[in-house]
Image (tube, rainbow, N blue to C red):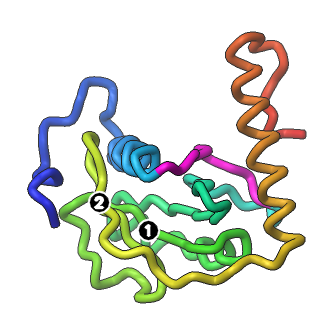
Amino acid sequence: MSQALTPLPVPEGFGEPAHVIRRGVLRLLHGCGFAAVVELSLGSGRRADLAALGPSGEIWIVEIKSSIADYRADRKWHEYRMHCDRLLFAVAPEFPIECLPADAGLIVADAYGGELVYPGALHRLPAATRKAMLIRFARVAAGRLAMQSDPSLGDPDLR
C-alpha cells in the first residue's frame, strides 16, 4: 500500500466509515477517468454502492465494506456480478482483506483518496445487459443533475 493511504484525520462531516471510504473511492475513480453514480438501483432490485463507467465503456460495481461485520452480514453482493464487467470491494486501510473473495477487485481508500490494489476478474457483460446498464446509469445521472436545478422533479431512481 502507498504512503498516501496512511490514515489521516477525517474531514469534518465525514463521520460514517462508509462515507469516508466512498469519498476516497470517488476520488480514485475520477482520477482514472471513470464517472460514478452512488447508490444505483439495478434491474434485479438491488442497489450498488457505486457504479462506475470507464472511458472504454467498462462497467464496474464497487461494494463498500466498512467493517468485517458489515461484510459477513451482507451476502447480496454476489448478485451484482450480473450487472458489471468487474466487481470490486472498497475497504479502509485497516480492513482484513484476506477474507474478501479472490476473484473480486480491491480498492483501499480513506477520506483523501484510494488505491486500486487489484482490478479483479473481468466478466464481460452480454450486450443486452450492457445496454440496459448504460441506459440506467445515464437516466439516473441525468435525473440527479436535473434535481439540482429543480428538486420538485423527485428521485429519478423511483421511476
Foreground residue among 95 and 3 = 3
The extreme bottom residue here reads 102
Graded by Cα atoms within 10 Å as few (under 14), some (14 to 19) or many (20 or more), the crowding at tag 2 reads: many
Q: In the drawing, what numbered circle is on residue 115?
A: 2
Can see residue 107?
yes
Foreground residue among 65 and 156 = 156
Placement of the N terminus among the 4 image quadrants? bottom left
Circle 2: residue type: Glu
Q: Is residue 100 magenta?
A: no
The extreme front residue here reads 56
Q: Is residue 98 above or below residue 50?
A: below
> Whole-Å distance between the Cαs marked 1 and 2?
12 Å
Magenta residue span: 33-42
Task: Tell me the residue at 89%/71% (across/down).
Answer: 128
Is most of the magenta stretch helix, strand or loop?
strand
Q: List x then y, in percent, for residue 150.
A: 77, 11
**Residue at image mark 1:** 89
Graded by Cα atoms within 10 Å as few (under 14), some (14 to 19) or many (20 or more), the crowding at tag 1 reads: many
Task: Tell me the residue at 58%/64% (across/down).
Answer: 60
Q: Nearer the viewer, mark 1 or mark 2?
A: 2
Q: List x then y, in percent, for residue 54.
A: 58, 57
Task: Tell me the residue at 36%/75% (across/down).
Answer: 118
Q: Is residue 36 magenta?
A: yes
Q: Quadrant of residue 99?
A: bottom left
Circle 1: residue type: Phe
